[in-house]
Structures are given as structure tokens and as C-alpha cells.
Amino acid sequence: MAMIRPGGAALTQKAVETAKLPGGAKVLDMGCGEGDTVALLAGRYGFEATGIDLSSKLVDNGKARHAGLDLRRMEAQFLDFESKSFDAVFMECSLSVMRLREDAAFEAYCVLKPGGKLIISDLYLKDPDPEAVAKMLADAREKASRPKAEGACGENERPSSVMMDGAFVVGELAGMLEEMGFELEYFGDETNALAGFAAQAVMGHGSLAAYFKDIVPEGEDPAAYCACAAFCGGAENKDGNMENKDGACAYPKGLGYFLMILRKR
């Protein structure tokens, strides 16, 4: 199965070259799916590559497809690796669909060596409404300030201070990561990759909904394969087609795709 995300292998190669990763680098792919990026990093570049994913089915499929590849079932916000042990961490089309995204980003910080690179490609809002951004931040602050109540230990979600409507607000994301201890080295708009991804899906399958329905195994969450699938909602309507809350499976105007590279200070 080919990489199911905008940019595919070409964007991964661009990230490796832009980040100037050293030979023999130890790298981690968070949200690795079936391990295609891990296989590329190990095979083409000779990196010591490891992949983790929440889905045991995807990890098992990846191990069957890529013999000997180091793929593990693991939650992104609870990494079981030594601190300061990786030269680079990749999050390709995955951070936006991780639960507790801020925690996952901090885990990446913890396992990176000083000077290590965090490489993120994902969806973003190209021109977010300032009032909506202000409300997002206010909601996040209000929730964080609430006293902890009995029964709250099971909460898996919290209002985000960096993301709304299924995509990142890049300025807030960069600010959060810089406060964590990262330094932004590179930001590039890759929206053409998103447009090409959608065009190929429609050309080959008739619609985005049909594409994700065809490529996602029965019972799997489409978003586990690519954040872009979140706009199809992962739910089926009465006709058996996946749709989002507005009844459509399409990328809205103003949605972009980015590549961001940050260095751990």
C-alpha cells in the first residue's frame, strides 16, 4: 500500500534533506501507520528507524509487509523510550488526529537529543478568523483553569490552543513548540501536495469518500491513516458513503498543508 498522505515519499525526502539529518541518524516516526515512512528512512537513508502507532492492526500489517522493520504499538503521549535518544522525530499527517496533541508533542521533545529535529507535516488554516482564534484560546484557558473534579481522570480530550476545525493555527502551534524548547528552522507551504492528493483520489475512485472507503480496512478509523480523512468523518451515511458533519467529503476553502522543521534547543 502506498503512503496515504499528501506529498507521499517525496515530501519525506524533502524533509530529510531540508533538516540535514546526519548519516546513521536514529529516527522515530510517530503515527507510522503501516510503516512506509519507516521503511523509506531505513532503506534509502540507512537510518536506525522506529515507528509507533496506536493501531495494533496497522502495526501488524506493517510488520507483515516490511519484514524486520521496528514497528511498535504505542500511544504517542506515553512513549516508552529513553530520554534524549533520537536524532529526529517525524509526525507526518498524524499530530492533528492524536488525542492530547500537546502531550504528544512534549513526548517528542523529551525523546529528542539536544539539537534533534522535530519534523511535522499536517493540515493548517491558511487565513484563520482572528475572532475564532481568540475564542479557541479563551476556551483552552478556561478549561485549564477549572478545578479538577471527581471523575475527571477519564477525560481524554481538552480544548486545543493550537487547532480548530480539524486543522492547525500555525502561529499558535509554532508558539507552543517554541515555549516547549524548540526553535523553528523551516516552514514551507505544501498545499499543492494536498490538492494533488485530492485530485488523484478523485481521479482513481470518483470521490474522496470513495477513496477512503476503498483504502481503509473495515472497522478501522480513516483518520488513523491520514489526518485528511478526518474531513470525511469516518462515519457512513445511509448510502454507505463516508461523510463529515456537514454531509460532504471535501477539503474546505482555506485549508492548507505544511512542512515544519524545528530544532530542540
Image (cartoon, rainbow, N blue to C red):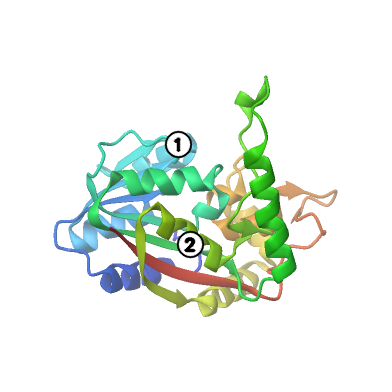
Quarter of the view holding residue 90: bottom left
Give the residue drawn at x 44%, y 76%.
188
Q: Position of residue 174 (x, y in %)?
A: 47, 64
CA distance separating discs 2 and 1:
24 Å
**Image quarter of the N terminus:** bottom left
Residue 224 vs residue 213, the one in the foreground: 224
Secondary structure at badge 2 equals helix
Viewer-nearest residue: 20 or 152:
152
The type of residue carrying mark 1 is Glu
Q: Residue at x 32, y 53 (%)?
A: 38
Q: Position of residue 72 (x, y in %)?
A: 36, 37
- Compared with 107, 265 (above or below) is below
- Dot in front, 2 or 1: 2
Q: Secondary structure at mark 1?
A: loop
The tag on residue 151 is: none
Residue density around tag 1, few if under 14, some if 14–19, many if 20 or more, within 10 Å: some
Q: Amino acid at mark 2?
A: Gly
What residue is pinned by disc 2?
175
**In this picture, residue 155 sits left or right of residue 193:** right
Q: Is residue 177 visible?
A: yes
In the displayed structure image, the side of residue 249 where residue 158 appears, left or right = left
For the residue pair 263 and 74, the one nearer the viewer reads as 263
- Tally the numbered discs: 2
Give the residue at the far bottom of this rendering: 192
Q: Is residue 33 visible?
A: no
Specify the quadrant that holds the C terminus.
bottom left
Say which mark, if any, is on residue 75: 1
Q: Position of residue 31 (x, y in %)?
A: 44, 48
Quick one: label 2, few (<14), some, or many (20+) residues within 10 Å? some
Q: Residue at x 35, y 49 (%)?
A: 109
